[in-house]
Image (cartoon, grey):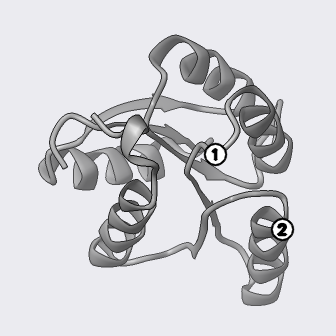
Amino acid sequence: MGADKILIIDDEPMVRHMIARILDRAGYQTVSAANGSQGLACFRRDHPALVITDIIMPEREGIGTIRQILRERPGTPIIAISGGTITGAADFLAMARELGATEALRKPFEPADLLDHVTRCLAARPLAERA
């Protein structure tokens, strides 16, 4: 595990902080962005091992962000997260999976569920991409 860097993209500061705290305590490095545009800039600058992105955000939403990340670096593990109504979140998360997100997680989630998703995504990377 260790030094893997994870990019968190979510427009809600409390959600970004909560996810970063969970991951930091588990030994990961985190960088955060408030929307897809900032997220792409961080992705290009920091070269994270994993991206966690919300779907519904202002400026650049998660679906477009996922597509752009995978265009620039195919195979990047991505966890899509979404809240809202169960049906709405499920629809957006299903769409995110169809477009290449590795995992999907509905908000709110338990810290253990997030860490399980992160572990699975990072373990699935080709050996050449692991730190």
Q: Quadrant of the C terminus?
A: top left
The structure residue drawn at horizontal position 65% and vertical position 53%, both measured from the top left corner, is 54
Element assignment for label 2: helix
Q: Give the x, y percent position of residue 86.
A: 72, 88
The structure residue drawn at horizontal position 29% and vertical position 71%, both measured from the top left corner, is 111
Q: Quadrant of residue 109?
A: bottom left
Q: Is residue 13 above or below residue 110?
A: above
Residue 75's disc is 1
Q: Give the x, y percent position of residue 73.
A: 67, 31
| Front in this rendered view, residue 49 or 39 | 49
| Front in this rendered view, residue 79 or 111 | 79
Q: Which residue is mark 2?
A: 98
Distance from label 2 to label 1 (Cα)?
14 Å
Q: Residues within 10 Å of mark 2 (few under 14, many from 20)?
A: few
The amino acid sitting under disc 1 is Gly
The number of numbered discs placed on residues in the rendered structure image is 2
The structure residue drawn at horizontal position 72% and vertical position 34%, both measured from the top left corner, is 69
| Front in this rendered view, residue 36 or 48 | 48
| Front in this rendered view, residue 128 or 95 | 128
The amino acid sitting under disc 2 is Glu
Q: Is residue 103 rendered to the left or right of residue 117?
A: right
Q: Is residue 101 rendered to the left or right of residue 26?
A: right
Q: Quadrant of residue 40?
A: top right
Residue 67's disc is none
Outermost residue on the bottom side: it is 87
Say if mark 2 contacts mark 1, CB within 8 Å: no
Q: Residues within 10 Å of mark 1 (few under 14, many from 20)?
A: some
The structure residue drawn at horizontal position 74% and vertical position 71%, both measured from the top left corner, is 93
